[in-house]
Every structure is written in C-alpha cells, then in structure tokens.
Amino acid sequence: SKPVTEINPHHSAGSGVNMNIIRHPRAPALTIERWFNTSQPITLESLRGKVVVMESFQMLCPGCVSHGLPQVSRVYATFPQDKVAVIGLHTVFEHHEVMTAQALETFLSEYRIPFPVGVDMPSPDNDVPQTMLSYAMRGTPTLTLIDQQGYLRQQYFGQVDDLALGAEIGALLNESLSVSENTSMASGCSDGQCAL
Amino acid sequence: SKPVTEINPHHSAGSGVNMNIIRHPRAPALTIERWFNTSQPITLESLRGKVVVMESFQMLCPGCVSHGLPQVSRVYATFPQDKVAVIGLHTVFEHHEVMTAQALETFLSEYRIPFPVGVDMPSPDNDVPQTMLSYAMRGTPTLTLIDQQGYLRQQYFGQVDDLALGAEIGALLNESLSVSENTSMASGCSDGQCAL
Amino acid sequence: SKPVTEINPHHSAGSGVNMNIIRHPRAPALTIERWFNTSQPITLESLRGKVVVMESFQMLCPGCVSHGLPQVSRVYATFPQDKVAVIGLHTVFEHHEVMTAQALETFLSEYRIPFPVGVDMPSPDNDVPQTMLSYAMRGTPTLTLIDQQGYLRQQYFGQVDDLALGAEIGALLNESLSVSENTSMASGCSDGQCAL
Amino acid sequence: SKPVTEINPHHSAGSGVNMNIIRHPRAPALTIERWFNTSQPITLESLRGKVVVMESFQMLCPGCVSHGLPQVSRVYATFPQDKVAVIGLHTVFEHHEVMTAQALETFLSEYRIPFPVGVDMPSPDNDVPQTMLSYAMRGTPTLTLIDQQGYLRQQYFGQVDDLALGAEIGALLNESLSVSENTSMASGCSDGQCAL
C-alpha cells in the first residue's frame, strides 16, 4: 500500500490572481475497437462533469482479476453514477491470440462486470494498443483518474489502497467547477497539446 | 458496507450570494479524563486547519478491535499528520470496572496504537461518559469526522468502508477554508449552541 | 463453509474380521487430451500410495480462480509431494471456443500454477468432457479426494473450508495401507464397475 | 504459515511387534483456578477418547484475538464435539493486574466465546502460571493438540495454518485406539514422568 502524502491540488483556492497553478494535461481520447456493457460508444467528452475512474486490465492478468477489477466494482457500487463514471479498458499487450474480444465477452459475463468496458484499439506496428500508448501506461492493472473537466489527474500502476483512492475521488468530487475552468483557461492547455 | 450516495457538501460553490447553505453544528468540546500517546492534552481548537478523524471505542468491543481501530490506524498511516489528525476516544459505557485507564494503557501498548487516545470523562449520574453524551453517540465503534474549521460533518455508528471514508476525508481536505469561513459566519453558529 | 460432521471412515479399526466395512468406489481413470506442467502423462495408478487432491476447474470460472485454485496451491505448498499429489483438471463444459488449451497455457503461466494440469478429453456428443462425466461432477470448482489405494473418497462441488479439507487429507494420510488393502479385496470393487 | 513436512505418526502401522515406536509424553494435568462456559471443572481424563485442541491465550494479546481464538472457534464449529474437544486456557504471564478473571469474563461474553475456558493457576513465585509452566509454553498464542489417549502430540507457538491444523486433527481422529493403547503400554509412560 502506498501512503498518500499529497492530495493532488488542481489549483490553489483563491481569487485566480497570483495562483500557484499546477497544470494538468488533458486526458487523451479513448481509441476503442468495441464496447461492452453499453448501448453506445463512450467518449470522455460525454463524461464531462463526472469524475472518471478508468481501470486498464487484461482478463488473464492475476492482479487485475484479484485486485483491480474488484476495487473499481466497489467504486461503482459506492458512488452515484451521475457523479463518478467507472469504465474498464481492455489493454491487451501480450497473448493477443487468447485474450480476444470474444474471450473478453465471456469473462465479463462470468465475472458479472457491470460497468462499460472498451477494447483498446490494436496498434498497427506495436503489441501495445493505442490508448495504452497515448496514456503511457506501464502495464496492467493501471487505474486512471480524470477530473470533471477532462484533465488527467492521477495514474497508478499496480495497487492502490481503498482509503487513498477514496480520498482522491472525494477530493475531485469536491472541486469547484467554476474555479477549475478558470484554471483550465489560465493553463492554456488544449486537447491535442497536453498528451502525457 | 454502506454506499455513499452523497458527499456532504458544506456549501455550494459560488459567489457567497444566494447560496443554498447547509449548516453544520460545531463539534462539541472533548471532555477528557486522561490522555495517552500525547505529551499534552488535545483540544479541538488546537486541531483547527486539520480534518479530524475520531474513533470512539471500548477496548473490549470486538467490532472496535477488529475493524474500527485498524481502519483509523490505516487513516493515520495514509494521510499526512499536518492535514489529518487521528484521535481515539475511550468511551466506556459498560463494564467500567474492567475497562479502566490502567487496562487501556496495557491495551494501547499491546496493540501498538500510535495516535493520541483520550479517556472520556465519566458522567456523574450516567453510565455513558460526557463526550459520548454530547456527541449523542449510539454505541461503539463510532467514527466522527470534523472539518478543518471544527464543524461536525459526519458520524458513523458501526462500520464504514475504506472507499467511502476515504472519499469523505478527501472531500474535507479539498474544502476551501476562506469560503467555508464565510459559511460559518452566515450560519450564525456558535460553539455552545450547535450540539447535535 | 460447510461443517464436517463426520470424517469419512474407510473402515472400522480392528482385526480385519467382522469389520463394518464402508465400501468406496474406485476413482475412475482420467481421460486427458493434453497435460501441462509435467514431463509425462499422469495416471491414477502412478499415484498409488499418495493421497490425491484433484481440482476440477475452468479458467474463466470466478470461484475456481478466487477460491479453488488458491486452496489447492496451498495444499501443494503444505504437504510433501511424496505423500499428497495435487493435480488440476481443466473440465470445460461451456464457452469451449475461448477456453482452449492455448488459452489455458497462458492462464497457467500467468497465474504461476505449479502442479500438473490435464485438459479433460472432450466428449463426442456432449458439452461435458469425459472425465467430468465419469466422476458425475456437477460443475466447477469440484474438489476430489482419492485415497492412497485409488478409491474415490470425497467430492465437493463449490467451496470447502481449509480446516475441513485439511482434516480429510490428514485422515487419509493416516490410514493404514495394509488394513485398507484388505478392505479393498473385501469390497470386490473393480475399476470399471464402481462409477459414482 | 508453516508447511507441514510430516504428519506426526504416533506409531507405525503393523502388528505391534518390532514397531518403530515414537513415544509421546502424557499431556500434563491442567491446574485451573476457575472455569468459564462449563458447569463443572474439566480434566484431561474426562476428555479421553476425544482429540483435544487447547488454545492458550491472553485476552489482551493481539495475535490471540485476531488469529488464535477465531481459529479454534472455527475448529469448534467444524468438528463434532464428541470427537474434538476445544478448550481455552487463559495463561496470564504479564499485566496480571488488568487481565483478571473478572475482565476475562467480560471478554468471553463480548467475544461470544462458546467453548470452556480455564484460568491457569498463578504460580507462587513466578509470573508464568502453573499449567503454562508444565507445558513449557513459550508465550501466547500457543495451540496444543492432545490425542484421544491423553498424549501430547503437538504444540505450536504463534500461528499455524488451517490446512496444517486440520490435517493434524484429521490424522489424530483417524488413529486406531486399540493399537495406540499398546503403544501407550509399550512406552511405559506415566503421568508424572513425561513432562515436556
């Protein structure tokens, strides 16, 4: 377990003048081959106003199955869906021949995963799929937190404790949107330019 | 486990005008007979600026020993001490003859409880001690959250999940003090008048 | 968890005369398409003199992955291999198209399963494979105990506690072989005739 | 967790002639100040014919409360009481002033301990009580196994896994009494002479 020594501040509270701004990158767009558990494709834009908790996993990754997916299922059960969006991302970077979309469909059904899961789009010349590359993920499981305005706020590779994760979600839920929007403008960040 | 359906908002974000203010009571003062694990007595006033997580327990209460105290020990290990203050409150309301301060001292030593623990002051005419009465606690374990300005924000009797507790702590850590102070003035609440 | 109300006695202790014999069937032969984690195929005959703990599982069965396989891995780590043989049996009776031998190979590698695992031979006209049929298993996970002489002694569908399982293994380890051999002869049981 | 590398054999199976006998000491008598959860005092003699699982604990010993007592409570729930006797032994060797019989009574009630518990008799000139001394226990928790004939078969200081403990209980339950009685005679062991 990793102690949280700092709740990542998006901005200092205050007037918007002389702020010690910490700039966050825009969360890169999701490039998805196929979605499960949702009637229509999900974009990060459609989740604006919600804190997004994204679990990147592989169905045959033991740490994903024993820790990561159960944890985000607890997140899904704990927070209201109009405040926190939980999505899974099947980021296959090894053993592609057995972790197919068809196998994933069986896995999601057997494990009764209730939230939307997207299959990360394969890369033309790389074992690592496209969204995994654009987020610079180091492996699976990776848990990513995106704030209500679409900024990438935290990315954990491996395990994170429920207390620490809860604290980050609670802090992001309690951010003032209006102030954050100022920060967004102040930072000069636009979608294509803030890739990790 | 109890799902969190709402992160308690201290105030709506905004200008301070026409706010839909939710008033919180001041946390009642702690009335303590004796402190352990601290060189000097602790008052809530001395903890202003920190989120306070207070665990009320009895040393022979199984749920306190198996769940409550381990959970706040995780809180103590997870959050920085200058942001989150963890304190224990030994609220003996039964079997007073065996849960003495001397027995508690052995218990705290054997269980290696690292944070300050106060012995709740016995009531003259009641088995329930004074602080426990002033917080209207229903039993043990009870977990109480007090915000950075000393307002009583949440009180759980029984168990609360790490994710939900983490979210509440994270939200309280992320509150803007300046706005909250306005709220405090607006509410007109003063220390003696806002008992639960 | 299921309390064990009776340790299955193979025989009453005594002289071999006038014994109140409880007859057990021979464990049916294993019909295996392919083995993993062993240099040569395993037969029950080759395991005579050992207590056999066999875990029938499917790689996408949640209860198998979270409970059954970890439990027999503990069995494998707890008991000496010359006394207790642990084997896995991949009994695919649904979703055959994604739980292939190739997928199983990846699963066994990712989960670091150390003991031999056989792929149960598909049935010509039945989704349920051949060994699963001959043991009349009801689903997965199923844990089967075979005694040192090859008799089928216990079969659990679902979960069994470590204490109860340990007790059964300990009882089977402590059986006197010479007496049991008498029982075997007395029962007149032969391989083909004692199917469950 | 400690792997079991050998199930302690009380005797080799066979004719009683030329046996490679492993002699076990008689379990020392229990010297008890006071019993709880039983209408009359318990002696080891009264438990002949049962496997005895004895948990030595102190009510303020964390490992006893979190591991030892829950484990023997599982033993108590798993095995039939006419086969396996579970007893607790309150072996106070430190902090005598707070771990009194009165405090223990509250503890047993709060934790709903269902099996008989004896308070080990204090020693005149030693912090370690009498039964604890006669069993040469090294501390708490200590789990002691006594076979159906009253021989001391195993003593664990610290934690033992459920699988390993189950295996020992299962093996002791499956011992043939008639053969063991011969062993007992052959060993020439008598009560006072076989202290550990």
Image: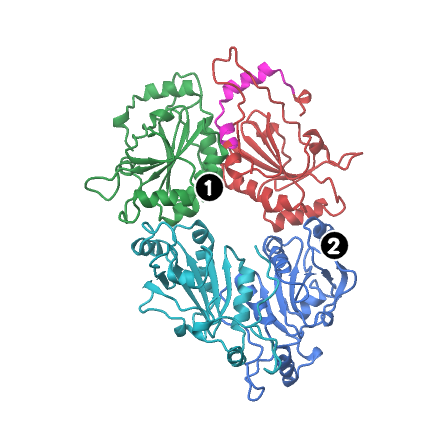
Chain colours: A cyan, B blue, C green, D red
Sort mark 1 into few (<14), some (14-19) or many (20+) by Cα contacts within 10 Å: some
Label 2 SS: loop
CA distance for labels 1 and 2: 39 Å
Q: In the rendered image, which quarter is residue B145 located in?
A: bottom right
Occupied quadrant, residue D131:
top right
Q: Quadrant of the C terminus of chain D?
A: top right
Q: Which mark is residue D110?
A: none
Residue C144, position as x, y percentages in the image = 37, 35
Residue C21 x %, y %:
37, 23
Please, which chain is the residue tagged with disc 1 on?
Answer: C
- Asked if residue C34 lies left or right of residue A82, the reply is left
Q: Which numbered tag is attached to residue B100?
A: 2
**Foreground pick, B85 / B138:** B85
Range of magenta residues: D168-190
Residue B150 visible in image:
yes
Identity, as a three-letter code, of the amino acid under mark 2 = Thr
> Considering only vertical position in the picture, is C39 above or below B98?
above
The quarter in which the N terminus of chain D is drawn is top right
Q: Is mark 1 on a helix, strand or loop?
A: loop
- Count of number-bearing discs: 2
Task: From the viewer's side, name the closer residue of A166 and C194.
Answer: A166
The residue wearing badge 1 is C161
Amino acid at circle 1: Asp
- Between C122 and A47, the one lying in front of the other is A47
User: What is the residue that sits farthest to the front in this orientation?
Assistant: A125
Name the residue rendered at 69%, 55% in the picture: B114
Residue A101, percent from left and from top: 31, 56
- Within the magenta stretch, is there residue C148? no
